Structure formats: structure tokens, C-alpha cells
């Protein structure tokens, strides 16, 4: 995850998560994460080849903008699990285009129906997209 996400979520991570933060400004010795690295590729390399790589089943990209952009265009990214939110928000950063490289699929572990957040009432849906093989 990126610096901004880490600032919001660092006290809410699960002990089984190996969190790697990509940032130019977060201190290298941040105590609550596995590592702080300077780039997306460095994070993926660490998770795939580092000392705990054999324990890592999946890698989830939890933001920020640059990490999303790198992941969608990275050949090692073969699946997207997206949350589609059914509400308009005033914002200036959006998830990058991915339709040209991925197609929506059904997945047995993810129910494809609209849910509603009980606190906010905002409707959303989880979607799985697989990379189109060329």
C-alpha cells in the first residue's frame, strides 16, 4: 500500500498480513510493517522472493494511485478483485483503465450481488477480473 493508505490503516491490519509500504517518505524502520520500499516492483520482488515468500499465497494492492497504475500494467498481475461502489464522489483520482487487458469472470468465493454498507447505506459489489491471455 502507499503512504496515505498506510497512514490511515496501519493500526487496523491483521497480524497474518505481510504489509509492504511503497513510499519515498515513510521511515525505513516503520515498526508495524514487513518493509518500506521505494517502488512497486521492489515491493513485488520482496514478496515473491524474500525470506517469507513461501508463506505468501496472494498479493493485494491496497493503493495508492501509482501502485494501482503499476499493477494493472504489470505482467505479474493476473487477477483484479475490485470493489465497485454505486455512489458518485467528488474526487480527482480514479482507478486506471483496465478493460482492455482484463475481463470480468465469476468466482466461486465471491458472490456477485449488490451489498449495502450498514453504516453508510452505500451500495457496492465485489468483482473479479482475469487478465486476457494474448
Image (spheres, rainbow, N blue to C red):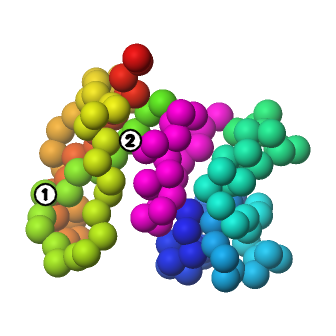
Question: Residue 106's quadrant in the figure?
Answer: top left
Marks 2 and 1, how far apart at CA = 16 Å
Task: Assign the N terminus to one quadrant of the image.
Answer: bottom right
The local crowd at label 1, few if under 14, some if 14 to 19, many if 20 or more residues have their Cα within 10 Å, is few
**Residue 48 lies within the magenta run:** no
The local crowd at label 2, few if under 14, some if 14 to 19, many if 20 or more residues have their Cα within 10 Å, is some
Question: Residue 105's quadrant in the figure?
Answer: top left
Q: Residue at x 41, y 18 (%)?
A: 133
In the drawing, what numbered circle is on residue 86? 1
37 versus 3 height, above or below = above
Q: Residue at x 28, y 63 (%)?
A: 94
Locate residue 54, reporting x and y percent.
Answer: 79, 33
Q: Residue at x 30, y 70 (%)?
A: 93
Res 9 seen here? no
Locate residue 48, reporting x and y percent.
Answer: 73, 39
Viewer-proximal residue among 4 and 111: 4
Query: Would you say the residues marked 2 and 1 are in contact, meaning their CB atoms lie under 8 Å apart?
Result: no
**Residue 67 lies within the magenta run:** yes
Badge 2 element: strand
User: Is residue 20 found left or right of 105 in the rendered image?
Assistant: right
Number of marks in the rendered image = 2
User: Is residue 12 found left or right of 27 in the rendered image?
Assistant: left
Badge 1 element: loop
Query: What residue did someone put label 2 on?
Result: 81
Which residue range is magenta in the image?
Answer: 57-77
Q: Residue at x 40, y 17 (%)?
A: 134
In the drawing, what numbered circle is on residue 111? none
108 versus 68 height, above or below = above
Question: Residue 112's quadrant in the figure?
Answer: top left
Amino acid at each position: 500500500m502507499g503512504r496515505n493508505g498506510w497512514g490511515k490503516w496501519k493500526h487496523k491490519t491483521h497480524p497474518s498480513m505481510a504489509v509492504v509500504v511503497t513510499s519515498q517518505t515513510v521511515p525505513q524502520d516503520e515498526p508495524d510493517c514487513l518493509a518500506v520500499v521505494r517502488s512497486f516492483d521492489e515491493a513485488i520482488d520482496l514478496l515473491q522472493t524474500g525470506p517469507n515468500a513461501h508463506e505468501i499465497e496472494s498479493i493485494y494492492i491496497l493503493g495508492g494511485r501509482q501502485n494501482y497504475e503499476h499493477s494493472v500494467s504489470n505482467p505479474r498481475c493476473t487477477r483484479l478483485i475490485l470493489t465497485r461502489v454505486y455512489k458518485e464522489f467528488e474526487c480527482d483520482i480514479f482507478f486506471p483503465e483496465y478493460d482492455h487487458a482484463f475481463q470480468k469472470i465469476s468466482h466461486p468465493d465471491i458472490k456477485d450481488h449488490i451489498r449495502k454498507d450498514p453504516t453508510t447505506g452505500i451500495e457496492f459489489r465485489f468483482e473479479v477480473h482475469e487478465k486476457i491471455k494474448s
